[in-house]
Amino acid sequence: MSGRVEQVRVADLVCLPQVRERSGFGDDELAGLAQSIREAGVLQPLLVRRDGDKLVVVDGERRLRAARLAGLDTVPVIIEDAALAEGQVLHRQLVIDAQRVGLSPMERAGAIQRLMQATDWTAREVAVKLGISPAQVSKLLALTVLPGDVQHAVASGRMAMSAAYELARIADNDERERLASEVMSGALTRDALALKARETSGPRTAAKARRKPAPRERVLIRLGEGRSVAVSAPSLSVDGIASWLTELAHQVRDAGADGRSLSEVVAAVSVKAR
């Protein structure tokens, strides 16, 4: 980064999709910022990067849009001289937003998912880079496997993230949709939902144990480099597998947090699942 503040023409700056959704830029909020900029100018320089002949905004899209609304021809910027990959840009945007304005849970979950895809970082590496706990990353990623209507409910504030995470623990799609409807209507509290989630994924009753095992479906997911994951259950679905693997990753991390060996962690997780 050059560290030098330069005045750049507004027309020369380009905005690409960023972490924060456009819904975060309300018309009234932009109008108020534009009026402030007319009176005092842009007090905090925008952070931009070079992309060929373009200057792409990394941080400051809201200030740029307000400056355009205020009729400014130029704005102060700090130019990142080094070429940045998509993952590096996302990393900067996430850190900047986390330090200044909190993202909504769904924005943060989607950004972390994009960040992992762009960088090949693991959930633990993302947690270290962003300064948050691995458990929080796991819970946020669990939101991305939920149905669209539930994600919209979380994004709009009609459902708390904690309730959405409990829903993600439920593998049965029909049961999850039914409970989601009850949560959004106010008929089911988060604590009651957590209890139902534990009952759904908890130990089998003696009566269930005596039943003849139902036919099971099995898939083998090949991950390359000789790695694979086998998943077996009476019924399999994309959402179910994603939810189970997210929960398993969370349990393995927690079980291994005190330095136990892999065999001890596997035994601990297996006992918990009985």
Image (cartoon, rainbow, N blue to C red):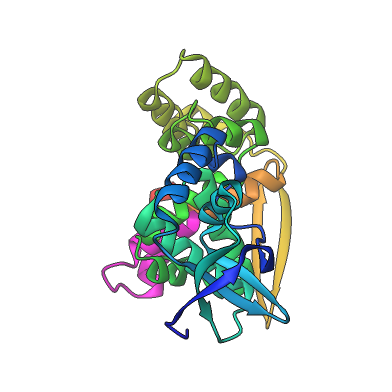
Please tell me which residue is depicted at 59% across the width and 37% down the height of the picture: 151
Q: Position of residue 191 (x, y in %)?
A: 35, 26
Find out whether residue 201 is within the magenta segment. Answer: no
Viewer-side residue, 140 vs 23:
23
Q: Is residue 164 above or below residue 62?
A: above
Give the main secondary structure, helix, strand or loop, of the magenta stretch. Answer: helix
Q: Is residue 169 visible?
A: no
Q: Position of residue 270 (x, y in %)?
A: 43, 56
Please tell me which residue is depicted at 48% across the width and 30% down the height of the picture: 157
Q: Is residue 193 above or below residue 121?
A: above
Q: Position of residue 91 (x, y in %)?
A: 50, 69
Viewer-side residue, 121 vs 96:
96
Tally of numbered tags: 0
Q: Is residue 215 visible?
A: yes
Viewer-side residue, 190 vs 25:
25
Q: Position of residue 259 (x, y in %)?
A: 29, 74
Viewer-side residue, 123 vs 56:
56
Image quadrant assignment for residue 12: bottom right
Span colored in magenta: 248-266
Q: Is residue 97 above or below residue 31?
A: below
